[in-house]
Every structure is written in C-alpha cells, then in structure tokens.
Image (cartoon, rainbow, N blue to C red):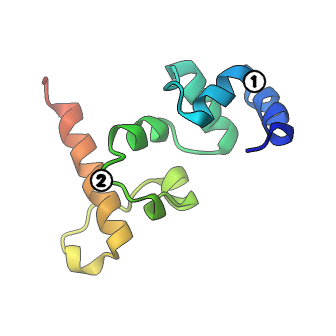
C-alpha cells in the first residue's frame, strides 16, 4: 500500500500510521488490538492474520484469497480428492490450528 493509501486506511482502521507501516514492512507483528482493528477494517474474519502468521510455511501465498481471509477454509470434508490444492492447504492449516488450540503444549 502506498503512502497515499496508508494514511486514509490507518484513519479508517483507527490505527497509528507508523504502526501500519511497521506491520506492512514486517518490522513487527501486530498486537491483538491492532490486529483486530485491521481485520475489521478489511472485512476479514477475526484471527485470520494470526492464523496466517502462525502457519505461513504451510499456506501458499496463492491460497490467501479474499474468500479465505473472509470466510476461512472450507468446512471439513471426508475426501481430500474432492479438494483443489488451494483448498487442501487451507483445510490442513485449519486442522493444524484446531489441533494446536486444543493441546496444552
């Protein structure tokens, strides 16, 4: 996002402009409050930024569609053969996230 787009978005999201720039450049990870504000401003589902950051090594960039960011991976399916590669990666990420949230470790 260029400077001209960053300023209005930062205002809209109620996030400091310097914070937004730091997030975009990867200089720091968002705090929960900032993350929630950015997700809400973009119309993304709650927690999706953390999900992507936590599983970036298994979620290919082309799987990060608007649908994924807003609705999440498809509901669990019984046959992996019925999924596209993109959907399969999203499903695996979802299952891994669910499993790690249940684990006390």
Quick one: SS at disc 1?
helix
Q: Residue at x 38, y 62 (%)?
A: 74
> What label sits on residue 58 in the rendered view?
2
Q: Residue at x 64, y 45 (%)?
A: 43
Sequence-earlier tag: 1 or 2: 1
Residue 67: x %, y % from top left: 53, 60
- Between the C-alphas of marks 1 and 2, the distance is 30 Å
From the viewer's side, name the closer residue of 99 and 61.
61
Q: Which mark is drawn over residue 17?
A: 1
Compared across the picture, whether 73 is left or right of 16 comes to left
Determine whether, in the image, residue 12 is placed left or right of residue 58: right
Residue at left 47%, top 41%?
48
User: Could you tell me if residue 93 is visible in this image?
Assistant: yes
Q: Which mark is residue 27?
A: none
Label 2 crowding class (10 Å Cα cut-off): few <14, some 14-19, many 20+?
few
The crowding category of the residue bearing disc 1, from other C-alpha atoms within 10 Å (few below 14, some 14 to 19, many at least 20), is: some
Element on which disc 2 rests: loop
Residues at discs 1 and 2 in contact (Cβ within 8 Å): no
Q: Quadrant of residue 3 in the image? A: top right
Q: Is residue 99 above or below residue 103?
A: below
Is 96 placed above or below 21 here?
Answer: below
Q: Is residue 37 above or below residue 82?
A: above
- The quarter of the picture where residue 34 lies is top right
The quadrant of the rendering that contains the N terminus is top right
* Picture quadrant where residue 54 is located: top left
Between 60 and 101, which is closer to the camera in this rendering? Answer: 60
| Position of the C terminus by quadrant | top left
């Amino acid at each position: 996002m260029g400077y001209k787009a960053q300023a209005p978005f930062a205002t809209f999201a109620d996030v400091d402009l310097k914070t937004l720039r730091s997030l975009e450049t990867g200089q720091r990870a968002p705090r929960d409050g900032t993350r929630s504000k950015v997700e809400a401003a973009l119309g993304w589902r709650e927690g999706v930024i953390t999900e992507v950051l936590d599983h970036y090594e298994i979620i290919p960039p082309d799987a990060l569609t608007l649908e994924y960011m807003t609705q999440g991976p498809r509901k669990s399916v019984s046959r992996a053969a019925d999924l596209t590669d993109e959907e399969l990666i999203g499903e695996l990420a979802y299952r891994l996230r669910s499993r790690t949230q249940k684990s006390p470790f």
